[in-house]
């Protein structure tokens, strides 16, 4: 999600770049360390450029800030809120706080509604990079798997449209930013953790797993021989604000405990290409093209109950948690990701609560609207100081279908039941046994394999019947089911049995 704050209505003409920006002190891009910070535009509205806020963040161990930069189609060469950005960026860098700039369309169709929109947008990212040479981390787009932020989402034939248009914008931005400074860290995707995959729905959203596949498909179709991103953005919010971090999401959505699912989706989408992948034990960088990608979790947080507190207005639209629970959840995230080498940064959304409750505001910060400090600030500080207290999390890509299984016990007229924890296709085959073939030949009968093809929806069992076969004559066959993942048909699982189990009720 993106909160656009303190919009300046007067356009600041920036057709000529200032040769030496006042925000030029150098802070390295996101490297092998784990950084904790906040996503916060609050500094743009402060007379001190956020100095007091940055000092406060630093005192609690936070070392990074993500700031939003809007792209407006009507002003493609004007850096929105330039003066306020310059002051805030300079102030952060002077205090040693790493700055990530998130560049995204101000309106969902700002890039896609213009035939030259991709190039205009890429040029704009370069313009921003030239203006702020002290910043080397740029996030491209904001939750492009949601129609509210990147449109159109679907084509007329109901296929995903946003994946290809976003991939084009990301690739062009990558090239434009690297031309400014080869050391710039281009962070792609910045995904919402959820999508409903229902073309024509009011929200027009795509689940992150399917969006990653759509971007990968477009990348492969482009025949590009360079990467399109150095790191990968994700916003692992809970599905419901009261969900604990360990609850996660069902496939194809992604939560705190589902990063392995997302890493598999990324591998499915880009393996064998010039795009680097996530590190695996004993592996080297992909095809020698560079370092592995890491997660930049640039939005995360739980909203707290602000009822009867000073400084807030409006009505809340989601269930909230108490401040002690928020402190426990946020510190748990720090501890978890400190042990995950695939995560480069965790940025909480926000540092300061927004005053307005409901859909226009978010109360997940460490600072209340009246300026007082919530318990979460100290809890996060302690977790940062504690670092990783457990084992490092390892991950390997899979070549099989996740959760593939077959229940070989007949029931209600069906021979067996096929399941998987992701969408898949399947081919079920009954092959006559040698003894059955021998007997059929003696009786001058023909006995042939019987095959059925179908689809499996994640977590939903498919009931399988095979023509002419019942439990009574099933001993004449051996059975097999081959499943293939829909996101990568090369990932397969084959399950076999020589005989079906006896049904609980004879059929």
Image: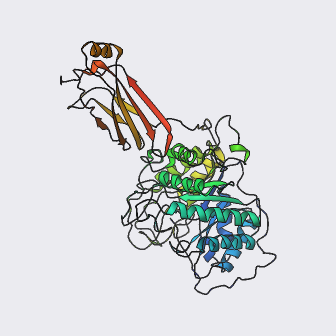
Q: How many marks?
A: 0
Q: Position of residue 271 (x, y in %)?
A: 61, 45
- Toward the front, the furthest residue is 444
Q: In the shown orientation, is residue 308 left or right of residue 43?
A: left
Which picture quadrant has residue 430?
top left
Q: In the shown orientation, is residue 130 left or right of residue 462?
A: right
Q: In the shown orientation, is residue 42 left or right of residue 13?
A: left
Residue 403 appears in view:
no
Q: Position of residue 451 (x, y in %)?
A: 34, 32
**459, above or below 61, in the image:** above
Q: Position of residue 224 (x, y in %)?
A: 65, 56
Which picture quadrant has residue 435?
top left
499 or 108, which is in the foreground? Answer: 499
Q: In the shown orientation, is residue 297 left or right of residue 226?
A: left
Q: Position of residue 265 (x, y in %)?
A: 53, 47
**74, above or below 240, in the image:** below
Residue drawn where x is 70% and y is 70% of the image: 126
Residue drawn where x is 63% and y is 85% of the image: 11
Residue 456 appears in view:
yes
**93, above or below 327, in the image:** below
Q: Locate the C terminus and report the quarter of the image it occupies.
A: top left
Residue drawn where x is 59% and y is 38% of the image: 395
Q: How is the image coloured?
A: rainbow
Which picture quadrant has residue 473?
top left
- Toward the bottom, the furthest residue is 10
Residue drawn where x is 68% and y is 47% of the image: 292
- Toward the right, the furthest residue is 20
469 or 191, which is in the foreground? Answer: 469
């Amino acid at each position: 999600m993106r909160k656009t704050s303190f919009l300046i209505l007067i356009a600041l003409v920036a057709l000529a770049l200032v040769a030496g920006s006042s925000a030029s002190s150098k802070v390295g891009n996101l490297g092998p360390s784990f950084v904790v910070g906040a996503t916060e535009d609050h500094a743009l509205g402060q007379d001190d450029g956020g100095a007091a806020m940055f000092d406060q963040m630093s005192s609690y161990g936070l070392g990074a800030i993500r700031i939003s930069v809007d792209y407006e189609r009507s002003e493609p060469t004007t850096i929105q809120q330039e003066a306020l950005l310059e002051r805030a960026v300079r102030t952060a860098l002077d205090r040693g706080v790493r700055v990530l700039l998130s560049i995204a369309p101000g309106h969902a169709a700002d890039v896609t509604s213009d035939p030259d929109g991709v190039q205009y947008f890429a040029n704009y990212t370069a313009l921003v990079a030239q203006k702020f040479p002290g910043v080397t981390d740029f996030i491209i787009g904001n939750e492009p798997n949601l129609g509210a932020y990147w449109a159109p989402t679907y084509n007329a034939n109901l296929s995903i449209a946003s994946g290809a248009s976003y991939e084009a914008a990301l690739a062009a931005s990558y090239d434009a930013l690297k031309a400014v400074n080869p050391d710039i860290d281009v962070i792609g995707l910045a995904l919402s953790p959820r999508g409903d995959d229902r073309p024509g729905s009011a929200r027009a959203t795509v689940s992150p797993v399917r969006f990653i596949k759509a971007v990968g498909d477009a990348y492969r179709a482009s025949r590009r021989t360079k990467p399109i991103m150095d790191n990968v953005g994700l916003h692992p919010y809970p599905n419901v604000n009261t969900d604990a971090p360990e609850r996660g999401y069902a496939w194809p959505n992604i939560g705190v405990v589902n990063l392995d699912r997302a890493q598999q989706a990324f591998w499915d989408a880009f393996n064998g290409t010039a795009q680097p992948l996530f590190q695996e034990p004993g592996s080297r960088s992909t095809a020698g093209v560079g370092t592995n990608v890491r997660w930049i979790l640039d939005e995360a947080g739980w909203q707290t109950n602000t009822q009867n507190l000073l400084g807030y207005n409006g009505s809340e639209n989601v269930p909230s948690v108490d401040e002690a629970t928020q402190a426990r959840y946020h510190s748990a995230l720090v501890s978890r990701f400190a042990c995950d080498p695939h995560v480069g940064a965790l940025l909480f959304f926000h540092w300061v609560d927004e005053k307005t409750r409901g859909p226009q505001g978010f109360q997940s910060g460490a600072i209340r609207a009246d300026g007082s400090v919530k318990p979460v600030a100290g809890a996060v500080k302690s977790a940062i100081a504690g670092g990783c207290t457990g084992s490092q999390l390892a991950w390997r890509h899979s070549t099989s279908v996740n959760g593939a299984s077959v229940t070989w016990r007949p029931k209600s007229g069906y021979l067996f039941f096929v399941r998987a924890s992701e969408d898949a296709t399947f081919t079920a085959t009954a092959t006559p046994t040698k003894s059955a073939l021998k007997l059929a030949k003696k009786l001058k009968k023909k006995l042939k394999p019987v095959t059925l093809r179908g689809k499996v929806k994640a977590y939903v069992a498919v009931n399988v019947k095979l023509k002419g076969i019942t439990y009574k004559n099933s001993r004449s066959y051996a059975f097999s089911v081959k499943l293939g993942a829909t996101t990568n048909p090369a990932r397969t699982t084959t399950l076999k049995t020589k005989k079906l189990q006896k049904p609980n009720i004879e059929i």
